[in-house]
Image (cartoon, grey):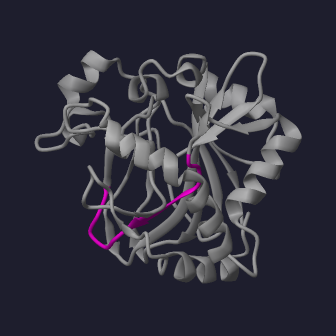
Amino acid sequence: MEFVREVDTFTARHFDDLDAGRVRALRISEFVAPDVAGYLADRLTQHPSLSVYRNTSELMRVGESHYETHDEDSHTNTQALEEYLSRAETLVTEIRAACQPHPSPMDLLWRLLDESMGLRRAEIAGRPMFAGVVRVFPEGSELLPHNDVFARDAPGVAAASGITAQFAANIYLQVPDDGGTLQLWGLRPSEQELVALQAPGSVYGADRALLPAPDVEVAIRPGDLVVIDATRLHAVTPQRHGRRVGMSCFLGRRAGHPLICWS
């Protein structure tokens, strides 16, 4: 079993291996130069849209996540969805501008993927989704074990129903001095199993006490790009000293079509 595979580009075979469970993570070390990563973390966290997630208040973000268009009962909030879609292009442009004079790391990733496998932005009813959210994990915060499934989060959306595999790409700009490691499991729990594993008081995460030890804990480094299988359980340990800042998006594979991306 290969846990973390170091690569210098991405190929369809790499994503095959992630999907099949032959590897837990792909990493391009220093995808962004560490000094540039630090500059971008400072710049992006000054963006006026920096605020807590609508439904995960311990974390903050610049941009928006499709996950935030759901209420606690998992039903779509139509007003939140309309706001998310109407602001998508503006936020992508503003985040790109905030990275100047450097290119946006997300643009670099999307170009790399487009050249190797083809890439398009995911759409809902013909409207592009936002992609490239900047996530901020304040000191003391964590991300409980969970998985991400577009078809579950966007029922009835054509792009979601056609996805055969879903990945998460994370570009780390700033990391805590202690904590904040990425935990990865090989488990793909069913929806019924997720309900049974749910942590008390959490609307999204599993109770670590009910899970086996993770297969691997990945120590994150500024500038690194890491891609994982989003449908398998993953988590982030508490940021014990310092904060974590990164840019992320989902990648969806569809048979006979380019990859799609969204946040």
Residue positioned 33% across, 71% down in the render: 138
Q: Residue furthest right?
A: 115
Image coords of residue 79 (percent x, y): 33, 42
Image coords of residue 122 (percent x, y): 62, 35
Q: Is residue 242 above or below residue 71?
A: below
Quarter-wise, where is residue 31 in the image?
bottom right
Residue positioned 26% across, 61% down in the render: 58
Say which of 2 and 90 sits in front. 90
Image coords of residue 249 (percent x, y): 57, 48
Q: Is residue 99 above or below residue 62?
A: below
Query: Magenta residues, as a range?
Result: 130-142
In the rendered image, which quarter contains the N terminus? top right
**In the picture provided, is 31 more to the left or to the right than 114?**
left
Residue positioned 75% across, 76% down in the render: 102
Image coords of residue 13 (percent x, y): 79, 29
Say which of 253 and 243 sits in front. 253
Residue 189 among those drawn in magenta: no
